[in-house]
């Protein structure tokens, strides 16, 4: 347990040190800025992390480096900002009243009409510009996935983004020139103390490290664990749920580790999608498209892989892929640890194999074998920043005769949990990997799934889509199969 307890949340807001000792666990950064500090440049649009009107930058120390990322203030809880630097659009105002380079680019390219969404676009582009002063269109579009504009049109906004680098030098920007000072200030806030405010259901706790987290959850086994709040935030803003007491993982750096072992990639439960992206796409390039379509940039900067698994949503983006890869959920309660195959972690809708006081510590992902065929497909109404209607993961291994040696097929959106298609797999194993075998296996889908109809998709649509995804996987892997069989022949 942390040696001492601090009864206030501390962070830097623009250029001011903020200390809060009377704060609700569910107070959002958006409400704090607009209502508490009268900083109303940050707008409220959707209140669920979809539109980006509330975008601000949050700077935090990662391995000693100060990194700024765009986040959704509407679903980010203030308590999770302990030790961070929050930057709002007001910070861009110059003393002489002149516009910041990013703002000037938006004006010069006519990239703003009603202006409601503009501060969010400015902050997203500001964050991109600091990381990459000369971004290409692909990088710009990725950075703006989480920002919606209903009147201007994105072409003008992309032109604005392209023109920023020609307008000025990023190295002279205040957030760049003052990195050393802000870094020193944030280092001074790192005191290795647990933050604890309030009592009973109103209590919020920000543990100092993983051991302190384990102690806190043993003392408060019914507490809600909040990592990135990209899901839990909506419980508060949309469903008005009482989630107290709340334990925040934002300072538990032990859970932010990425370990590349000889046979596994291990992601700490606190690793965000953005942090995981380089390692994930290096070891599993088949996941690149899926990863780039998880929410928008702000959601990927906040959301964690461990949280996506821990919540057990039947339409979570990562569980089907992780089931397809044969991943394990590493759980901890106190000092006791256990490992559960991820496909067995999901028991039924709303129920996972996790006891009160137990938390997800890491996700352990086996490396693919050379002869594994693997793919993941996400189907949604919008290409970007949308929830899956159906998500399917497929991993097949063939023997030297072209027969299916093993098959793992998993879907999200087809049942109350992410689930394997056991009957389809059984029909494939031992069969020649050809169109006839695929069509025979497809007949087994009703044995595995009875999908529901909701606003995302009808039951009939989901069933047809799942079948077609298996057909797609076969057609896309046919050429790869021939290459691998030829390698077997050469090796023989």
Image: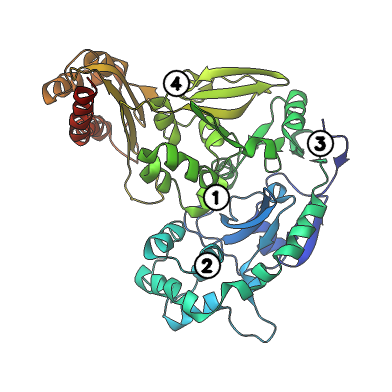
- The reply to whether dot 4 and dot 1 touch (C-beta < 8 Å) is no
For discs 3 and 2, the disc positioned in front in the rendered view? 2
Q: Which residue is drawn at 36% across and 45% down?
A: 289
Quadrant position of residue 433: top left
Q: Where is residue 39 in the image (x, y as percent from the top left)?
A: 67, 68
Q: Mark 2 points at which residue?
A: 129
**What separation in Å lies between label 3 and label 2 (alpha carbons)?**
43 Å
**What separation in Å lies between label 4 and label 1 (alpha carbons)?**
26 Å
**What separation in Å lies between label 3 and label 4 (alpha carbons)?**
37 Å
Q: Which mark is residue 343?
A: 4
Q: Mark 1 points at which residue?
A: 301
10 Å crowding of disc 2: few (<14), some (14-19), many (20+): many
Q: Quadrant of the N terminus?
A: top right
The secondary element bearing badge 3 is classed as loop
The answer to which of marks 1 and 2 sits earlier in the sequence is: 2
Quadrant position of residue 85: bottom right
For discs 3 and 1, the disc positioned in front in the rendered view? 1
- The reply to whether dot 3 and dot 4 touch (C-beta < 8 Å) is no
């Amino acid at each position: 347990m942390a040696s001492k307890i601090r009864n206030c949340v501390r962070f830097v807001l623009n250029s001011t040190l903020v200390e809060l000792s009377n704060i609700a666990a569910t107070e959002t950064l958006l409400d704090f800025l607009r209502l508490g500090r009268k900083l109303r440049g940050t707008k409220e649009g959707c209140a669920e992390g979809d539109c980006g009107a509330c975008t601000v930058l949050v700077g935090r120390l990662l391995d000693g480096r100060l990194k700024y990322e765009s986040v959704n203030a509407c679903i980010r809880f203030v308590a999770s900002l302990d030790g961070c630097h929050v930057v709002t659009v007001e910070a861009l105002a110059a003393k002489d009243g002149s516009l910041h380079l990013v703002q000037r680019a938006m004006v010069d390219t006519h990239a703003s009409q009603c202006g409601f969404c503009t501060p969010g676009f400015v902050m997203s582009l500001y964050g991109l510009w600091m990381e990459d002063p000369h971004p290409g269109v692909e990088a710009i579009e990725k950075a703006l996935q989480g920002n919606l504009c209903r009147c201007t049109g994105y072409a003008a906004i992309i032109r604005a983004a392209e023109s920023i680098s020609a307008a000025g030098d990023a190295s002279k920007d205040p957030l760049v020139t003052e990195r050393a000072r802000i870094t020193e200030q944030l280092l001074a806030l790192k005191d290795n103390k647990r933050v604890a405010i309030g009592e009973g259901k109103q209590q919020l706790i920000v543990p100092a490290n993983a051991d302190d987290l384990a102690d806190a959850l043993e003392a408060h086994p019914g507490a809600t664990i909040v990592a990135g709040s990209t899901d839990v935030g909506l419980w508060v803003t949309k469903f008005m749920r009482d989630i107290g007491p709340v334990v925040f993982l934002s300072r538990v750096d032990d859970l932010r580790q990425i370990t590349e072992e000889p046979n596994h990639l291990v992601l700490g439960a606190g690793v965000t999608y953005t942090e995981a992206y380089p390692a994930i796409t290096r070891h599993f390039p088949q996941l690149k498209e899926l990863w780039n379509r998880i929410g928008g940039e702000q959601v990927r900067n906040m959301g964690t892989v461990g949280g996506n698994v821990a919540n057990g949503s039947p339409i979570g983006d990562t569980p089907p892929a992780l089931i397809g890869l044969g991943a394990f959920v590493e759980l901890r309660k106190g000092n006791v640890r256990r490992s559960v195959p991820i496909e067995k972690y999901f028991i039924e809708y709303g129920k996972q194999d996790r006891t009160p006081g137990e938390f997800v510590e890491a996700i352990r992902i086996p490396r693919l074998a050379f002869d594994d065929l693997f793919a993941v497909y996400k189907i949604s109404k919008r290409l970007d920043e949308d929830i899956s209607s159906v998500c399917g993961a497929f991993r097949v291994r063939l023997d030297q005769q072209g027969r299916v040696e093993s098959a793992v097929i998993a879907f999200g959106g087809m049942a109350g949990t992410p689930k394997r298609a056991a009957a389809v797999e059984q029909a494939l194993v031992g069969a020649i990997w050809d169109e006839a075998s695929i069509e025979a296996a497809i007949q087994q889908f009703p044995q595995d799934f009875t999908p529901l109809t909701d606003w995302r998709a009808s039951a009939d649509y989901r069933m047809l889509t799942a079948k077609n995804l298996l057909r797609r996987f076969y057609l896309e892997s046919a050429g790869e199969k021939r290459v691998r069989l030829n390698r077997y022949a050469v090796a023989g």
